[in-house]
Image: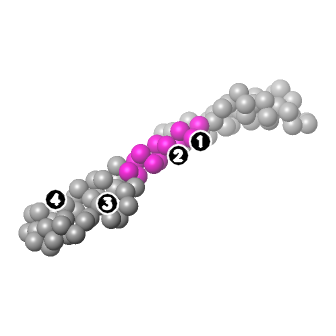
C-alpha cells in the first residue's frame, strides 16, 4: 500500500475540492477498485502460503504412536474431503 503522502498531494487535493458529482463518483470508484484489487492480491498471497503439503502431513500424522495404516487413510480422506469442500465454497 502506498504512503498517504504519495496518494494525495496538495495539488491533487485542490483539484478534488473542485470536482463535480460525476468526477467525485469516478474518483471514489477508482479508490474502491484500487482497494478491492489490493485486497484480492493480498488474499491470493495468503492462500498460496497456506497450501497443504499432503505428503508431509501424511508422514507427520503417520509418525504419531497408535496411528496405523487404516486410521491414517481415514484421517487423510477426512482432510481431503474437508479441503475440497472449502474449495467449492
Prevailing secondary structure class for the magenta stretch in the rendered image: helix
Task: State the residue at coordinates (34%, 49%).
Answer: 37
N-terminal-most mark, 3 or 4: 3
Give the CA separation, mark 1 to mark 3: 32 Å
- Tag 1 and tag 3, C-beta contact below 8 Å: no
Residue assigned mark 1: 50
Residue 77 x/y as whole percent: 68, 32
Instruction: Give the secondary structure at mark 1.
Output: loop
The residue that disc 3 covers is 6
Which element type, helix, strand or loop, lies under badge 2?
A: helix
Magenta stretch contains residue 43: yes
- For disc 4, the neighbor class at 10 Å (few under 14, some 14 to 19, many from 20) is few
- How busy is the neighbourhood of tag 1: few (under 14 within 10 Å), some, or many (20 plus)? few
Q: Residue at x 40, y 52 (%)?
A: 39
Q: Which residues are magenta?
A: 38-51
**Image spot of residue 63 (x, y percent):** 85, 33
**Which comes sooner in the sequence, label 4 or label 1?**
4
Q: Camera-side residue: 27 or 59?
A: 27
Q: Which residue is mark 4?
A: 26
Q: Which mark is residue 46?
A: 2
> Reading the chain from its start, which is encountered first: label 2 or label 4?
4
Quadrant location of the N terminus?
A: bottom left
x and y percentages locating residue 84 in the rendered image: 56, 36
Q: Are marks 1 and 2 in contact (CB under 8 Å)?
A: yes
How far apart marks 4 and 1 lie (CA) works out to 36 Å
Indicate the position of residue 48 as horizontal and vertical percent values.
Answer: 53, 39
Can residue 31 be seen at all in this image of the molecule? yes
Amino acid at each position: 500500500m502506498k504512503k498517504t503522502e504519495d496518494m494525495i498531494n496538495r495539488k491533487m487535493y485542490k483539484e478534488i475540492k473542485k470536482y463535480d458529482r460525476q468526477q467525485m463518483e469516478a474518483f471514489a470508484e477508482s479508490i474502491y477498485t484500487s482497494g478491492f484489487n489490493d485486497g484480492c492480491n493480498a488474499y491470493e498471497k495468503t492462500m498460496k502460503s497456506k497450501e497443504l503439503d499432503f505428503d508431509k502431513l501424511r508422514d507427520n500424522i503417520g509418525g504419531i504412536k497408535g496411528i496405523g495404516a487404516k486410521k491414517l487413510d481415514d484421517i487423510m480422506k477426512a482432510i481431503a474431503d474437508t479441503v475440497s469442500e472449502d474449495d467449492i465454497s
